[in-house]
C-alpha cells in the first residue's frame, strides 16, 4: 500500500522543531556510510567535524567569526525566500560589497580616523544592493527568472574581482600575488573579544536577526511578504504590489550580502583577495532553510554551519578528509532538511484496506 501526504489543518510545531534534528541525524547516518567507503575512521571524522569546534575557546571564537557573515547573508535572503523571490546570487553581492568597501583604503591608503571602517561598511552594503538592482529590474520589467540572473551575476562579480586584483588594484609590493595593498589600521573593524579575531561585525549580524524578526513577525510589510509567498492570488486581490516585493527582496538580500563582504575585508582579512569568495553566499542558502526561514532559527543554523566550516578544516587535517566530503555533508544536510520540513505542513497517511486491516 502506498502512503499519501495529507495537508495538515495547521503547521506542526513539533515537526518544525524536530526537522533540523532529524535532518542532522540522517546526514550523519548517510555520511557514516560514505566515510566507511572512503576508508576513513567515522569516529575521528565526526569528532573533528561536529565536536572539536566547541571544545576550545580558540576554535569556538573562529566559529563565532564565521557565524557573522553567514547570519547576515541568510537573514537577508530569508526575507526574499518567504516572498518566493529566490536570490541565488548572494555570493556575487558579497564580492561586490567587498570591492566597494576596499575602494576607500585602496584609493586613500594614508587616510586616518575612526570614520574609515564605518564608511567601508556603508559602501559595501550599497555595493551589494546595487549589484541586486540588475536582477530586480529584469524580473520586474522583463519577467526574467531571478534565479538564473542572480547566479550569472555572481560569475560576473568574480571576474570583476579578478580584473581588479590582476590589474589596477594589484599591490606592486605583493610579490605578484593577486591581492590589494594591506589596509591601514583605521580601516579595520575593532575587535569585540580580546585575544580573538571576532570583531564588532558579529553584533551587526545579531542586530540583523532582531531587525528581521521585528520586520517579518511584527510589521505589516512582513505580513505582505508572507501572504505574497503563500498565496500570490490573494496578495494581488488585496492590492499588495508584487513588483515592490521583488525589489525589496532582492535589495535587502544584496544589502545584507554586501555588508557581510565589507565586514570580511575590513575584519579578519585586512585586504582584498581572490580568496574573499569563500562560498558564504551559497552556504547562507542552506543556513536560511535550515533555520526554517525564521530569524531566530537562522541564528542557530548559522552557528551550526559555521561550526561545520571550522570542523571541516579540522577534519581535513586530523582525519585526512577531502574538502569535497565536507561539502557533501553540508549538501546532504539541506536535502534531508527539505525532506523533513515537508511534514510540518503535511502528514503521512497509510491507506486502510477494506475490512479494517491496514
Image (cartoon, rainbow, N blue to C red):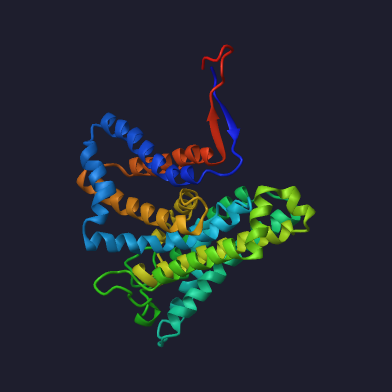
The residue lying at 24 percent from left, 47 percent from top is 48
Report the side of 150 relative to 46 (left or right): right
The residue lying at 35 percent from left, 67 percent from top is 269
Report the side of 54 relative to 164 (left or right): left
Q: Quick one: 251 or 19, which is closer to the camera?
A: 19
Q: Is residue 115 visible?
A: yes
Image-quadrant location for residue 7:
top right
Q: Quick one: 29 or 91, which is closer to the camera?
A: 29
As drawn, 323 above or below 274: above
As drawn, 15 above or below 38: below
Q: Is residue 158 visible?
A: no
As drawn, 74 above or below 41: below
Across and down, in percent, residue 165 comes to: 44, 65
Report the side of 342 relative to 141 (left or right): left
As drawn, 216 above or below 342: below
Q: Among all residues in the image, which is located at the extreme top?
A: 355
Across and down, in percent, residue 57 comes to: 23, 63
The residue lying at 38 percent from left, 52 percent from top is 305
Across and down, in percent, residue 191 comes to: 32, 75
The residue lying at 30 percent from left, 61 percent from top is 62
Across and down, in percent, residue 335 comes to: 46, 39
Give the tally of numbered discs: 0
Q: Among all residues in the image, which is located at the extreme front?
A: 356
Amino acid at each position: 500500500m502506498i502512503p499519501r501526504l495529507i495537508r495538515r489543518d495547521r503547521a506542526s510545531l513539533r515537526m518544525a522543531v524536530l526537522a533540523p534534528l532529524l535532518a542532522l541525524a540522517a546526514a550523519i547516518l548517510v555520511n557514516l556510510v560514505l566515510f566507511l567507503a572512503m576508508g576513513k575512521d567515522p569516529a575521528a571524522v565526526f569528532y573533528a567535524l561536529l565536536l572539536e569546534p566547541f571544545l576550545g575557546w580558540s576554535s569556538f571564537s573562529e566559529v563565532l567569526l564565521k557565524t557573522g557573515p553567514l547570519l547576515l547573508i541568510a537573514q537577508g535572503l530569508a526575507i526574499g525566500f518567504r516572498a518566493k523571490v529566490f536570490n541565488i546570487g548572494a555570493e556575487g553581492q558579497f564580492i561586490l560589497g567587498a570591492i566597494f568597501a576596499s575602494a576607500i583604503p585602496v584609493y586613500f591608503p594614508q587616510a586616518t580616523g575612526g570614520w574609515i571602517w564605518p564608511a567601508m561598511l556603508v559602501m559595501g552594503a550599497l555595493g551589494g544592493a546595487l549589484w541586486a538592482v540588475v536582477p530586480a529590474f529584469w524580473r520586474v520589467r522583463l519577467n526574467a527568472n531571478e534565479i538564473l540572473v542572480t547566479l550569472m551575476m555572481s560569475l560576473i562579480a568574480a571576474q570583476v574581482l579578478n580584473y581588479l586584483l590582476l590589474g589596477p588594484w594589484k599591490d606592486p609590493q605583493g610579490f605578484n600575488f593577486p591581492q590589494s595593498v594591506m589596509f591601514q589600521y583605521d580601516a579595520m573593524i575593532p575587535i569585540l573579544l580580546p585575544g580573538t579575531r571576532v570583531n564588532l561585525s558579529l553584533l551587526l549580524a545579531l542586530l540583523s536577526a532582531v531587525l528581521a524578526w521585528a520586520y517579518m513577525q511584527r510589521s505589516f510589510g512582513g505580513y505582505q511578504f508572507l501572504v505574497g509567498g503563500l498565496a500570490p492570488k490573494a496578495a494581488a486581490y488585496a492590492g499588495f504590489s508584487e513588483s515592490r516585493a521583488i525589489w525589496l527582496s532582492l535589495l535587502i538580500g544584496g544589502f545584507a550580502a554586501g555588508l557581510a563582504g565589507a565586514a570580511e575585508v575590513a575584519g579578519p582579512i585586512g585586504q582584498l583577495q581572490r580568496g574573499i569568495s569563500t562560498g558564504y553566499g551559497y552556504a547562507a542558502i542552506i543556513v536560511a532553510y535550515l533555520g526554517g526561514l525564521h530569524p531566530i532559527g537562522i541564528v542557530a543554523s548559522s552557528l551550526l554551519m559555521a561550526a561545520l566550516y571550522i570542523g571541516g578544516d579540522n577534519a581535513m587535517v586530523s582525519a585526512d578528509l577531502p574538502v569535497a566530503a565536507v561539502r557533501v555533508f553540508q549538501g546532504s544536510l539541506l536535502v534531508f532538511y527539505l525532506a523533513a520540513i515537508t511534514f510540518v505542513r503535511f502528514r503521512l497517511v497509510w491507506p486502510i484496506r477494506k475490512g479494517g486491516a491496514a
